[in-house]
Image (cartoon, rainbow, N blue to C red):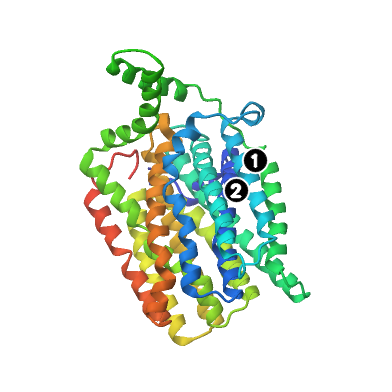
Amino acid sequence: MIEKSQTWSESLLVYKDIRMLRILLLGAISGFPWVLIASSLSLWLKEEGLSRSTIGWAGLIFGVYAFNYLWAPIIDRVQIPFLTKKIGHRRGWIVLMQITILLSLIIWSFINPSENLALLISVGLIIAIASATQDITVDALRIEQINADEGKSMAAGAAMAVVGWWTGYKLGGVIALFTAEYFQNIGISNYWQTTFLVLGIVIILMNIGLMFVHEPIETDRQSKQKETDNLIKDKLGSTNFITNFIAYISGTIGGPIISFFKKNGFAIALGILGFVFLFKIGEAFLGRMSIVFYKEIGFSKGEIAIYSKTLGWITTVIFTLLGGIFAMRSGTIKTMFIAGGFMAATNLLFALLAWTGKSDLLFAIAVIADDISAAFATVAFVAFISLLVDRTYTATQYALLASIGTAGRTTLASSSGALVDWLNGDWGTFFIMTTVMVIPSLIFLWFIKDKIKISAK
């Protein structure tokens, strides 16, 4: 924790570290694919005349983010032919996934949603899998930029990662929405398909930027993983191809899980997992349907881009950096309690907007308040799980915790469209329900707050 005598302006100096700029870029690379399978896909399907329920259930493709920990051990240990030797282990995986996303966008540019919805969603699933796989490596590379004993830098890095993610997501959304509207206005019938080709150029530019991100040479991780394999071999009592394979698989999959429960204790570990799963469910329900809500109450794509994307990005950047400092000074636990309460309160503004009708002023206030609360919550959340991971299993443990958090936001929130339909389009009641969804996670946090083993609470 930063000493009381240090001022906020002095605390800002931690962001001058060149590593923060690299983390910013990594965050942008991670956030950009969500533009494709969240807002862009949702609005594309909406303008093609598909129902709210269909749009909501299409969001099930986000479910892969909840399970990417299953193949995270592969990312920690398997090298990509040619790419690993040329640009490094972590960057090699990222580039491979970026190429997959780029090829998927090209395929999307040839698809008519009304005629080939199954194919469109299948390609969207491929983008989601590639993005979720990429996130494993991005998070590991981001954490490995900071030494394990640099608590302040870890909190600052978490803030920069969040700023980067929202930069990729918000500014990517601005590009997508304005480009789609421009192509629509000049008479291009397949304007969304053409827009995806433009977004493919952004993917290429991000890969160029990735080459400037330093990848630390790590040998200790591999040696410790081999130590775990050898311990398992000794338990098996013999050495041959089968026992070597069993030891490798057991060490790869079981090692990170055993390490997590051993460090925290079984009961506290379960409490941590419960909190992580529930923390941002209400925000996810709101976020999944927000762009549909904006469209239904009368906002154009351009207005959504200005208020929800551009204005939201500026707000997010400012308050994420402030949130990082707040987390450094007050601790991640206190920051999460404050952010959780703020998330619940801001959802009420959207209910008010639903009841009063289209209002530019209220829309701006709701977006700003929502982005402030999301910024504080995400910074604290990212710093929290970053401090929990064992550096021997960086990718796997972070992916496991992040996936559990994503599970709540994706699997449950996929029913958001059906919930609005069940409410007969009563958006006000829907947003009230998202407010209540925040409370269970804070109850979990209250019970584990004094027993969590991290360097700064």
Q: Quadrant of the C terminus?
A: top left
Residue at figure coordinates x 38%, y 45% from the top left: 401
Q: Which residue is mark 2?
A: 29
Q: Earlier in the sequence, mark 1 or mark 2?
A: 2
Determine the CA span between mark 1 and mark 2: 8 Å
Q: Nearer the viewer, residue 218 or 58?
A: 58
In the image: residue 275, left or right of residue 107: left
Element under label 2? Answer: helix
Q: Is residue 386 visible?
A: no
Q: Is residue 378 visible?
A: yes
Residue 294 picture location, percent across and down: 53, 76
The image quadrant of residue 22 is: top right
Residue at figure coordinates x 58%, y 77% from the top left: 49
In the image: residue 43, left or right of residue 253: right
Q: Amino acid at mark 1?
A: Leu
Q: Nearer the viewer, residue 220 or 285?
A: 285
**Disc 1 to disc 2: CB gap under 8 Å:** yes
Q: Which residue is mark 1?
A: 210
Q: Badge 1 local density, few (<14 within 10 Å), some, or many (20+)?
A: some
Residue that protrudes farthest toward the right in the picture: 186
Residue 74 picture location, percent across and down: 48, 34
Q: Amino acid at mark 2?
A: Ile
Residue at figure coordinates x 40%, y 30% from the top left: 252
Residue 77 picture location, percent across and down: 49, 29
In the image: residue 1, left or right of residue 445: right
Residue 328 picture location, percent across and down: 41, 46
